[in-house]
Image (spheres, rainbow, N blue to C red):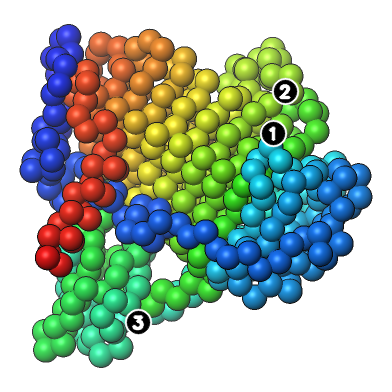
């Protein structure tokens, strides 16, 4: 559906898709339910884990010269749970440091006080070579990896095939048997594309663009079991389905038992050398943080300085908040490389997986891709309440869908839709992509036709006049609510509280 340009914006209006308090919202409509994003689905705060160890007790010096890598590793290995403290100081780290257990945090005294410094790349420490989609040799650290990691696996295994179709927006599915399930259990729902690419086409609402190089797609969604009808074989879920479940996609229910949950990185600074960045795919791994295969983990209150890439997140229900990215490197400005002009690195914050929340960030430097969603399993994610000098909202193709960018200050507003991902991988943004309350120094140009699938929603954004076929556009000044995620979460928690009452 689309809305013609209604002319000058009117103050104090509500979106026709939401209303004042969600009364106009439908779970099967253009706005997915984003209220479950982030650690613990936003239902309780991220914990402050009790102190359990101190890196200095394991030999860390913190003078910026002594290699403290092994001291950090020893402190983490000796800590079963709790926070490993990093007192104020400058700690030279020369190899990867990994948190690989649940309930473990690495906590500094603040990003200006407890600083990790790096004098070599990830390629120097642990080489990992690969190639781009066009066959160009490059380090895989160009788009992944970090010196500080939280790593695990999601513990997925098949439970039962789904026995009947279910429509997007429904909250229940039918199985042949529910005997293996229990109330409150976490499960996953997975679908795989068929030979006719019908799932890929559905994720683009029938208009995927060129997909000749698109690998087989799949979708999955996590949920909790709220109800069981053992006689009928039906499972009631805690959230609406994001995508239809159809027999031709072989949908199945999976058990979900993440090995690493409730772990975090907090109160730390990361400093890399001010080496000039030479452009995309030249990176050798001045990368700060990577979360991989984890659930309900977090990064908060960190400053990342001079990184080639900041944070990569793969998993489920993680939160990144209060992150500041800075640089004093020369900005990229070679002839013939306009896509990176003014940039100092490749990826700022990239999300893979589902239901992550990135909130309250501050980009004081520009990356080719400031904020990225990439791939068909990347859905239900939220970027909110952040700002940048000239934010790039990168949709990297391969059907990222049902993601929300809300209440963002895009700065200059000159490149919000600049996206990568390679040719033949489908349109940049998949179905049910929502851009809500985006601000900029001046009106931002509309995305080019074909940037996104039909069904793109742009609500209350600072946009230049014009029309975009297939998009829902509401030009509202003073949009209320200003942050869709916050409004959806408040509505859900109030309904749950009323139900308990």
Query: Badge 1, how many Cα within 10 Å: few under 14, some, many 20+?
Result: many
Mark 3 falls on what kind of element? strand
Residue 14: percent from left, percent from top: 14, 29
Residue 161: percent from left, percent from top: 29, 78
Compute the Cα span from label 2 to label 3.
51 Å
Residue 305: percent from left, percent from top: 69, 33
State the residue position of label 1.
305
Mark 1 falls on what kind of element? strand
Q: Looking at the image, which residue is at 73% across and 74% down? A: 78
Q: Name the mark on residue 159.
A: 3
Q: Looking at the image, which residue is at 11% across and 36% down? A: 19
In the rendered view, tell whether residue 319 sits above or below residue 292: above
Q: Residue furthest right?
A: 66
Q: Looking at the image, which residue is at 25% across and 11% down? A: 465
Q: Nearer the viewer, residue 340 or 299?
A: 299
Earlier sequence position, callout 3 versus callout 1? 3
Earlier sequence position, callout 2 versus callout 3? 3
Are the two marked residues, 1 and 2, in contact with CB atoms closer than 8 angstroms? yes
Q: Nearer the viewer, residue 74 or 250?
A: 74
Compute the Cα span from label 1 to label 2.
8 Å
Query: Badge 3, how many Cα within 10 Å: few under 14, some, many 20+?
Result: some
Do we see residue 444 in this rendering? Answer: yes
Q: Quadrant of residue 43?
A: bottom left
Q: Name the mark on residue 328.
A: 2
Q: Looking at the image, which residue is at 75% across and 56% down? A: 96
């Amino acid at each position: 559906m689309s809305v013609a340009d209604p002319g000058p914006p009117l103050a104090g209006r509500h979106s026709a898709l939401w209303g004042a308090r969600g009364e106009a919202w439908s779970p099967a409509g253009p706005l997915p339910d984003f209220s479950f994003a982030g650690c613990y689905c936003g239902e309780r705060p991220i914990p402050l884990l009790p102190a359990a160890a101190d890196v200095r007790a394991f030999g860390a010096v913190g003078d910026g010269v002594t290699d403290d890598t092994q001291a950090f590793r020893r402190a983490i290995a000796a800590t079963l749970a709790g926070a490993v403290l990093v007192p104020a100081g400058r700690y030279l780290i020369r190899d990867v440091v990994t948190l690989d257990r649940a309930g473990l945090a690495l906590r500094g005294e603040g990003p200006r006080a407890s600083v990790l410094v790096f004098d070599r790349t990830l390629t120097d420490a642990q080489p990992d070579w690969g190639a781009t989609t066009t066959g160009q040799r490059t380090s895989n650290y160009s788009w992944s990896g970090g010196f500080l990691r939280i790593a695990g696996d999601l513990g997925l295994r098949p439970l039962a095939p789904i026995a009947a179709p279910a429509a997007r927006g429904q909250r229940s599915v039918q199985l042949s048997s529910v005997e293996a399930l229990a109330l409150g259990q976490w499960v996953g729902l997975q679908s795989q594309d068929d030979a006719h690419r019908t799932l890929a086409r559905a994720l683009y609402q029938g208009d995927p663009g060129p997909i000749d190089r698109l690998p087989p797609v799949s979708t999955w969604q996590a949920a909790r079991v709220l109800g069981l009808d053992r006689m009928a074989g039906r499972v009631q879920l805690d959230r609406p389905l994001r995508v239809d479940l159809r027999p031709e996609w072989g949908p199945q229910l999976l058990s979900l038992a993440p090995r690493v949950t409730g772990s975090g990185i907090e109160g730390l600074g990361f400093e890399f050398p001010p080496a000039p960045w030479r452009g995309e795919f030249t990176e050798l791994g001045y990368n700060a943080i990577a979360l991989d295969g984890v659930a309900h983990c977090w990064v908060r209150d960190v400053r990342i300085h001079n990184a080639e890439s900041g944070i990569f997140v793969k998993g489920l229900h993680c939160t990144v908040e209060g992150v500041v990215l800075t640089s004093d490197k020369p900005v990229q400005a070679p002839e013939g490389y306009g896509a990176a002009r003014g940039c100092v690195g490749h990826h700022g914050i990239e999300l893979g997986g589902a239901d992550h929340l990135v909130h309250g960030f501050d980009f004081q430097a520009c990356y080719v891709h400031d904020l990225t969603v990439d791939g068909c399993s990347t859905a239900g994610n939220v970027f909110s309440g952040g700002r940048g000098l000239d934010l790039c909202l990168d949709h990297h193709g391969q059907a990222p869908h049902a993601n929300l960018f809300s209440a963002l200050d895009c700065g200059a507003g000159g490149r919000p839709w600049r996206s990568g991902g390679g040719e033949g991988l489908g349109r940049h943004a998949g179905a049910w992509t929502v851009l809500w309350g985006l601000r900029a120094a001046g009106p931002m140009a509309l995305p080019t036709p074909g940037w996104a699938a039909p069904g793109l929603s742009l609500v209350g954004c600072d946009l230049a006049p014009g029309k975009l076929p297939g998009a829902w556009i509401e030009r509202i000044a003073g949009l209320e609510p200003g942050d869709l995620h916050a409004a959806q979460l408040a509505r859900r928690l109030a309904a749950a509280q009323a139900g308990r009452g």
